[in-house]
Image (tube, rainbow, N blue to C red):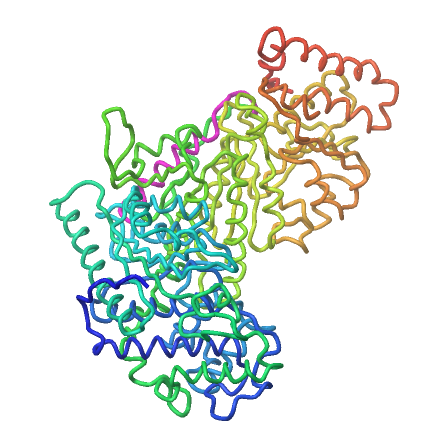
Amino acid sequence: MTDLVPATGPQPGGLDTVDAWWRAANYLAVGQIYLMDNPLLTEPLRPEHVKPRLLGHWGTSPGLNLVYAHLNRVIRERGTTIMHVTGPGHGGPAALAGAWLDGTYTERYPDVPQDTAGMRRLFRQFSFPGGVPSHIAPVVPGSIHEGGELGYSLSHAFGAAFDNPDLVVACVVGDGEAETGPLATSWHGTKFLSPVSDGAVLPILHLNGWKIANPSVLARLPREELDALLTGCGWRPHYVEGDEPDAVHAAMAAALDTVLDDIAAIQAGARSGKTVGRPRWPMIVLRTPKGWTGPREVDGLPVEGTWRSHQVPLPAVRENPDHLAQLDAWLRSYRPDELFTADGQPTAAVLANVPGGDARLGAVPHANGGTLLRALPLPDIRDYAVKVPEPGGTMSEPTRALGAWLRDVTAASAPRRDFRVFGPDETESNRLGAVYEATAKAWQGPFLDVDTHLAADGRVMEILSEHTCQGWLEGYLLTGRHGVFSTYEAFTHIVSSMFNQHAKWLHESAKLGWRPPIASLNYLLTSHVWRQDNNGFSHQDPGFVDHVVNKRPEVVRVYLPPDANTLLAVSDHVLRSRGLVNVVVSGKQPSPDWLDPDAAVLHCARGAGIWEFASNDAGTPDVVLACAGDVPTLETLAAADLLGRHLPELRVRVVNVVDLMRLLPHEEHPHGMPDADYNALFGTDVPVIFAYHGYPWLIHRLAYRRANHDQLHVRGYKEFGSTTTPFDMVVLNDMDRYQRVVDVIDRVPSLGRNAAALRQQMLDMRARHHAWIRVHGEDLPEVRDWTWPTGH
């Protein structure tokens, strides 16, 4: 092993209690993986004491336990507020061991007390039917980070540190997850972290050398190359390396004292004005063997310090007497009689460094953000609404109206600093630039004369990494704050997996009475599929919504506001909501204003409703024209206008859906409509011609159980796109107004041959459009300049 850093902190003799905690946590980690009975080895270990299915991950646990033990010491000695984020996959045995030892697990779950019975239950429940998972999950006190998927720990840590000036977030980065793209980008969080108004992030890069069956990249780098990489990313690494416990304890204690002194000095200098600019923050590189203190060899093959220790080093304990003997020796090597009393309580030596109360890593309030959450001061949206003297009589950019409202949300929350706007590189592009009147983009220098809207204390977060934006926002929300993530619709798929993990976290957290709900994760998807005619096919994909609706209905909501005022109403709603993932899809280009503010609020409260100004059905429609989304709404209204002019005797009802989940039965989603309400809107025996923003089969999926599903015909995006005109996009996908008239003629039996001439005229208009745009490069004047007729 590489030489250790000099020990300048507490010496080995003074770290006996740290070592006692570490050994106790290691014992508990092994016990969770293997044992279902005989937790203190008070009788000879027998096969029936061992679980029939051995699940869990030992390899990372001793390193995680080491970090927890040493963080306990510095919290107790220094009074520093520290939260820990654990990145290595499936580090559950260590996190559960730490929470049980510091007492927070028993406080949350009194049926798992700190005694022999509680230890037995702690062991048995781990990776066991009806128990707890092998990774770090919401059930673990002190956690905000789901450990099952790799790559997001450091971005979560930065999100937690933003606007928490007194918090240090210690983040263990596994060498496996360090190979992921999201983690590699998140090293750059220091370029956005203010030493004045934010807390600090302390990465602990744990290099134990191996993944499941392969060496890890960073662990095999020469020291100078690894040092260059981390230094080049703006960090000052401190190395703790070794395999002898006493020496590693001394080195780790010294390193922690040094880096916490450095953090305190950086913050003191910046906050007093003595230093300016971006600091070089300290970090720790911890290199210890994988599966440290576990079996060195099993069946003649090396295990400790190799990939074979990744999961269960002794796989056949019930069947193989040699494995059973090795497990017994392994557990006893921690000297449990020194660590636990006869009734299973941790000894005074083990608990000597446990901080008190909320200072414990398992109890720090920041890791239970719902306890800190305050309602945002939200201005009345009516003060920002666009004036609508009559439906469709004016045009506006919906997200620009939203930007003005978000500006004042940002300003009102400035004294509290608990609201931020996140996005890859598009706040201005997405017409939200008004927020810059209240704050700037966070940036830790250097600055150039040509820069605009940059400031060290800015609360708009932009980095061209959707992963990092989402990770920052998740960390921010999980620690009790609020935010919005604005991004191009097509590229939201980049964070689909992160959305999965967060949605699952919310679902599981809702089952725990001790975790109050956090603020909802709010996506604003703009620059959407129908107005990506300039960027072309690569930017045209509305499928993120399809992915979202797969999640538990208690957690997800999808909104498609058709104009500026409905966008304001929806945004006010989602920023007040708790414990959800809200997806709001809205265009940024000029579009018709359909509803005045009062009507918009009422329509959004309904979630779906009849637009009487566009309907002439007198309660008994011949056809229902339904729509969800801004461009589908425009084409639907234009089609209704054509039908009103050419087939005035046809009774047409226009239904707009703003809350997509309303289409589900109420038994399947909290926002779902009872059948009676659905039938009253859409009818039971008339054709429903539905224009939908995304892939059409999603509407069929949501409504397949409804009475008139056989008469439901949906138009939407069919994966046809190009660099073309706005109207050509809807023509390419058969969602245009002319095709919608054709659809009505084809599906309303009473029209028959009487509308044949109109049908041909509509198809001719599509052909005329095709020829026109290839000559003139813009849409037909009657399309481009169409407005809803006054007094229709």
Residue 335 magenta-highlighted? no
Image quadrant for the N terminus?
A: bottom left
In the rendered view, would you say 692 is above or below 503?
A: above
Answer with the quarter of the image where residue 354 lies. Answer: bottom left
Residue 568 spot, x, y in % from top left? 47, 36
Left or right: residue 692 compared with residue 557? right
Left or right: residue 738 compared with residue 560? right
Residue 355 spot, x, y in % from top left? 28, 73
In the rendered view, would you say 674 is above or below 39?
A: above
Instruction: State the residue lying farthest toward the top.
Output: 775
Answer with the quarter of the image where residue 192 lies. Answer: top left
Q: Which residues are magenta?
A: 391-416
Residue in the image at 62% along x and 15% along y: 783
Answer with the quarter of the image where residue 284 lies. Answer: bottom left
Left or right: residue 25 compared with residue 201? right
Instruction: State the residue lying farthest toward the front.
Output: 300
Q: Nearer the viewer, residue 542 or 27?
A: 27
Image quadrant for the C terminus?
A: top right
Residue in the image at 44% along x and 62% along y: 516
